Amino acid sequence: MKNLFKVIAIAAVFVFGMQNTTAQSLSQDQDRPEVIAKQKTSDLNEALSLTGDQQRYIFRALTANEVNYRKHVNGKDLSNPEVTANKKKYDDLLIKSMKKTLTAEQYTKWEAMQ
């Protein structure tokens, strides 16, 4: 009887532990730069009718932008000149990538979306 109780208790711990682990991993995945960039790329694809190559280049640019923002801008004091300079640098880099990748018409639409 004691062994049966122990087996049931251990099984319950595993079941409840797995549910908690799964919930944590789902919430963490939504915050990854790749997931955010993929969602933004998907939204841009719907709005701008991107080609496959454009989608790939934009995904890479958005991922790099998100990573750089997390490292150098997010959560920091925006009145700090270094943080402001980093923000401008990464914004300019994204704009340059978009100009290079998008057609003139798509770029105009993208600017209007910003």
Image: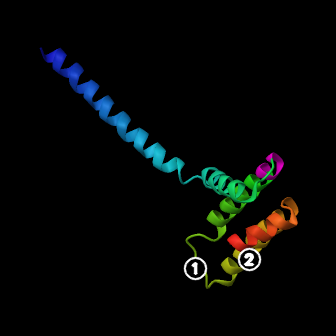
Q: Nearer the viewer, residue 99 or 27?
A: 99
| Residue receiving disc 1 | 77
Q: Residues within 10 Å of mark 2 (few under 14, many from 20)?
A: few
The answer to which of marks 2 and 1 sits earlier in the sequence is 1
Q: CA distance from mark 2 to mark 1?
A: 14 Å
Of circles 2 and 1, which is in front? 2
Q: Quadrant of residue 107?
A: bottom right
Residue at 23%, 19% (x, y): give it. 7
How far across and how far down the image is residue 75, in percent?
55, 71
Q: Which residues are magenta?
A: 52-56
- Residue drawn at (32%, 30%), measured in percent from left and top? 15
Examine the rendered structure and indicate whether residue 81 appears above or below residue 93. Answer: below
Amino acid type, callout 1: Asp
Q: Secondary structure at mark 2?
A: helix
Q: Nearer the viewer, residue 70 or 56?
A: 56
Asked if residue 54 lies in the magenta stretch, the reply is yes
Q: Marks 1 and 2: in contact by CB < 8 Å?
A: no
Q: Position of residue 111 (x, y in %)?
A: 75, 72
* Quadrant in which the N terminus appears: top left
Residue depicted at 54% across the width and 54% down the height: 31
46 vs 3: above or below:
below
Point out which mark residue 9 bears. none
| Quarter residue 17 falls in | top left
The residue indicated by pointer 2 is: 88
Give above or below for 62 relative to 108.
above
Comparing 24 with 41, the one in front is 41
